[in-house]
Image: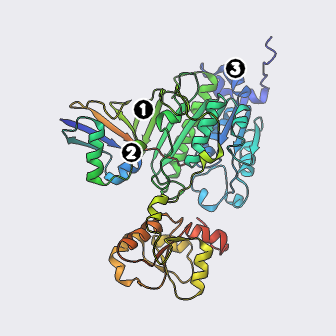
């Protein structure tokens, strides 16, 4: 008699009967799922379907790591959360949804998310980590912590209509994310953080594939995506499965690694445009970029012009009082409408598009063009909290 | 020689199409990408991309042959 044997009760046998019917799962496999501990990083677009399918599948311990609160613009794709959950912690709505799906699963919440300080010890508590994070900093942190804690990592990532899926670090010969992309791209070079947009149902596809890979990993069935990157483009339903090898020059898992421990400063990453671009133009009468509180002060003087470079539909969601709208792609045709002496402040949603416009205007002689860092999202957080965020 | 090129993510956007077949004299993907980058103002440096030839990840100095399929894959971080 195996002392670690787990018994499935009659209610569970009924619940999982369609799994147990499968030769590849059976009673033994279903018990393995119940013994398994899986951590889902991020209760967002990918984490939602991944966690829901893992819970439904009867994973014994399901960890959810996220520090964020639910916002209205999450609901188009993050199925763990509902309209009544807005402003509450994502982990709280995740717990109630997952418990309702399957009360036999022990849901463990990690409300600090994954941090450089906790990552390795957190991953040590789990058999598999599913990466549903939404930024390069956390992705590289997850990859490195999975390597140091010897935990398989099910990777999934999305952009607009495209997704990538792989499994890293599930055996000593397996590649890691850094074998594929050794370092994060420079800030601003790859749109992320809500700037690019994403199709909601794509999250369902990629997140479900991640849950599937995690389940295959637990059951040791089929062929894992370890050593392969699946790339899916859903507008044409074009898929590519590309073979990845462990890179001997990998800075993490190569033969002479540069990364030997997790240092918190290595994982800072923001979505702002590369700073070298902005520094080149700093020696002008006006700074090229200011924060929202400085912008608010300048606006109070009544001498500044405030331009909203977002798309018309975005103005219908929220706007800063006193701004005029000139969408980004119509700026070149409207240069004659812009002042050349008074401060010309530009904003968009997060500050990236308006920085493009600011740089364009500076190249065209508008030394008074100033970007508002963080855009209307920062304004809504710090200046006017009544604004609808999106 | 004729080379099929596939673009994903940001490159697909900047090129405006997903797949094309071009006639090129580029000896390797490094030269090919550098030509394309100039032509279409790609913002990503080759060091930020992963490159595959005929479904296997390949090095930038791989010797291109007539009929090869070259895939350029940028990293994406959304979740």
Residue in view at x 31 percent, y 52 percent: B15
Where in the figure is residue A138, as x and y percent of width and height?
60, 45
Instruction: Pinpoint the chain carrying mark 3.
Output: A
Q: Do callouts 2 and 1 point to residues on the same chain?
A: no
Against A68, residue A255 (above or below) is: above
CA gap, disc 1 and disc 3: 32 Å
Residue in view at x 48 percent, y 47 percent: A185
Q: Which residue is mark 1?
A: A241
A332 to the left or right of A289: left
A332 to the left or right of A260: left
Mark 2 secondary-structure assignment: loop
Q: Which picture quadrant has residue A213?
A: top right
Q: How is the image coloured?
A: rainbow
A277 to the left or right of A120: left
Characterize the local packing of mark 3: few (<14), some (14-19) or many (20 or more) Cα atoms within 10 angstroms.
some
Q: Which residue is mark 2?
A: B8
Q: Which residue is mark 3?
A: A27
């Amino acid at each position: 008699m195996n002392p670690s044997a787990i018994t499935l009760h009659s209610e569970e046998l009924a619940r999982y009967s369609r799994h147990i019917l499968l030769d590849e799962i059976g009673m033994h496999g279903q018990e393995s799922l119940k013994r398994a501990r899986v951590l889902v990083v991020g209760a967002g677009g990918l984490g939602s379907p991944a966690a829901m399918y893992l819970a439904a599948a009867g994973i014994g311990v399901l960890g959810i790591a996220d520090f964020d609160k639910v916002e209205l613009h999450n609901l188009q794709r993050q199925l763990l959360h509902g309209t009544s959950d807005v402003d509450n912690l994502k982990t709280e709505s995740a717990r109630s949804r997952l418990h309702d799906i399957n009360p036999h699963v022990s849901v463990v919440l990690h409300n600090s998310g994954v941090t450089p300080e906790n990552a390795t010890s957190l991953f040590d508590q789990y058999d598999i980590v599913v990466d549903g994070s939404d930024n390069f900093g956390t992705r590289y942190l997850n990859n490195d912590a999975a390597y140091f804690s010897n935990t398989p990592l099910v990777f999934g990532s999305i952009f607009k209509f495209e997704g990538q899926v792989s499994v890293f670090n599930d055996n000593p010969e397996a590649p890691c994310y850094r074998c594929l992309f050794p370092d994060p791209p420079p800030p601003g070079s790859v749109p992320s953080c809500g700037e690019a947009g994403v199709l909601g149902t794509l999250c369902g596809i990629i997140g479900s594939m991640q849950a599937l890979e995690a389940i295959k990993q637990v059951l040791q069935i089929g062929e894992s995506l370890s050593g392969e990157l699946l790339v899916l483009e859903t507008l044409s339903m074009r898929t590519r499965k590309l073979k990845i090898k462990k890179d001997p020059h990998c800075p993490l898992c190569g033969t002479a690694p540069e990364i030997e421990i997790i240092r918190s400063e290595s994982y800072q990453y923001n979505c702002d445009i590369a700073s070298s671009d902005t520094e080149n133009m700093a020696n002008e009468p006006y700074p090229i970029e200011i924060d929202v509180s400085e912008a608010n002060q300048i606006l109070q003087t009544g001498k500044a012009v405030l331009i909203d470079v977002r798309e018309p539909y975005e103005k219908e969601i929220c706007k800063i009082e006193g701004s005029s709208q000139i969408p980004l792609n119509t700026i070149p045709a409207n240069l004659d409408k812009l002042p050349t002496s008074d401060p010309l402040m530009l904003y968009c949603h997060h500050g990236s598009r308006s920085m493009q416009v600011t740089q364009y205007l500076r190249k065209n002689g508008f030394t008074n063009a100033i970007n508002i860092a963080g855009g209307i999202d920062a304004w809504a957080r710090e200046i006017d909290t009544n604004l609808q965020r999106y | 020689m004729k080379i099929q090129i596939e673009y994903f993510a940001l490159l697909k956007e900047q090129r405006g199409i997903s797949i094309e077949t071009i006639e090129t004299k580029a000896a390797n993907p490094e030269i090919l990408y550098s030509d394309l980058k100039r032509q279409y103002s790609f913002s990503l440096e080759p060091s930020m991309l992963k490159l595959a030839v005929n479904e296997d990840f390949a090095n930038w100095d791989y010797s291109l042959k007539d009929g090869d399929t070259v895939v350029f894959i940028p990293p994406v971080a959304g979740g």
